[in-house]
C-alpha cells in the first residue's frame, strides 16, 4: 500500500505571505533607519545626528494643514518623502528668507537624491503678502506652501519647555516619510549638518 504524500503547501498562501512581506519591508526599513539614527544604537558616535532631536516626535498631520486653495492636505497621502520645513507668517523676510535659502542649498547639495526630499513653507496667515508671494515664485521653485493656524503650530511644535519657538527661532524642521517631525536645525547649525543628516537617512532608507 502506498503511503499518502503529505499535503503540499498551498501556492496561494505562499503568494500572500510574499506580498505581505514585500509590503512591510519598506515600512520597517524606514522605521528602523529612523530609530537607529535617533538612538545612535549600532552606528559610530561620530555619525549620529547633528541636528536637535524633537522629543517626543510630533505628527505633522496634527496641524490640520491646508493647501493654497484652502483644501485639507495630509502628509500621509500627499507627502510620502523626507522633508525640510520652514515656518513663517504672511511676510517672509530677514531670517525667514535666509532659512528658505539654506533649505534650498541643502536640497541642491543632495545631488541625485534631491527627488527624495521636498521643501515646505508653513504659512500661519490666511494669505501671504504680494512681496512674499513674488519672492517664493521667483526664488523658491519647487517649494510647497501650506497653511496652518499659528495656535495649532505652537501647540504642536512648542509644547515643551525645551522646544524652540517655531516662528521666531529660525528653526528648520526635518520630517520623515511617515510625517513625523523628528529633528530641527537652528541658525547656529551649519548647513553641512543638515546635509550630512539627510544623506545618512537617505542612504539607510528605501526609496
Image: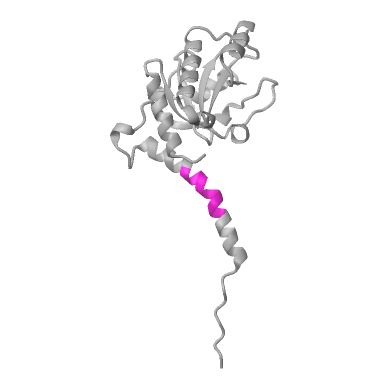
Nearer to us in this view, 60 or 98: 98
Which residue: 47% across, 19% down? Answer: 105
Image location of residue 2, percent across then percent down: 56, 90
Give x and y (percent) for residue 194: 41, 24
Residue 31 can be seen, yes or no: yes
Q: Is residue 158 visible in the rendered structure shown here?
A: no
Left or right of 116? Residue 72 is: right
Seen as rendered, the residue at the extreme left is 45
Q: How many marks?
A: 0
Indicate yes or no whether the magenta region holds residue 124.
no
Residue lying at the far front of the rendered structure: 112
Identified at 60% across, 69% down, the residue is: 10
Q: Which residues are magenta?
A: 20-29
Task: Name which residue lies at 52% across and 35% down.
Answer: 177
Identify whether 78 is placed above or below 5. above
Q: Residue at x 60, y 66 (%)?
A: 11
Residue 62, position as x, y percentages in the image: 57, 30
Query: In the rendered image, which quarter contains the N terminus?
Result: bottom right
* SS majority, magenta: helix
In this picture, residue 139 sits left or right of residue 35: right
Front-lying residue, 112 or 91? 112
Residue 24 lies in magenta, yes or no?
Answer: yes
- Looking at the picture, the colour scheme in use is one colour
- Res. 186 image quadrant: top left
Whole-percent x, y for residue 150 in the image: 57, 17
Amino acid at each position: 500500500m502506498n503511503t499518502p504524500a503529505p499535503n503540499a503547501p498551498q501556492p496561494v498562501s505562499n503568494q500572500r505571505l510574499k506580498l505581505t512581506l514585500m509590503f512591510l519591508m519598506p515600512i520597517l526599513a524606514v522605521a528602523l533607519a529612523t530609530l537607529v539614527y535617533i538612538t545612535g544604537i549600532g552606528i559610530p558616535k561620530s555619525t549620529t545626528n547633528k541636528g536637535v532631536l524633537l522629543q517626543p516626535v510630533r505628527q505633522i498631520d496634527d496641524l490640520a494643514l491646508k493647501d493654497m486653495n484652502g483644501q485639507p492636505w495630509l502628509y500621509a497621502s500627499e507627502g510620502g518623502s523626507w522633508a525640510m520645513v520652514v515656518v513663517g507668517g504672511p511676510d517672509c523676510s530677514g531670517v525667514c528668507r535666509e532659512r528658505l535659502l539654506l533649505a534650498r542649498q541643502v536640497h541642491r547639495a543632495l545631488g541625485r537624491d534631491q527627488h527624495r526630499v521636498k521643501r515646505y513653507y508653513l504659512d500661519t496667515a490666511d494669505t501671504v503678502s504680494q512681496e512674499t508671494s513674488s519672492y517664493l515664485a521667483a526664488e523658491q521653485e519647487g517649494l510647497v506652501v501650506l497653511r496652518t493656524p499659528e495656535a495649532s503650530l505652537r501647540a504642536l511644535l512648542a509644547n515643551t519647555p525645551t522646544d524652540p519657538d517655531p516662528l521666531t527661532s529660525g528653526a528648520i524642521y526635518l520630517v520623515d516619510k511617515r510625517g513625523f517631525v523628528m529633528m530641527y536645525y537652528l541658525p547656529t547649525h551649519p548647513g553641512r549638518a543638515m546635509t550630512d543628516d539627510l544623506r545618512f537617512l537617505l542612504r539607510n532608507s528605501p526609496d
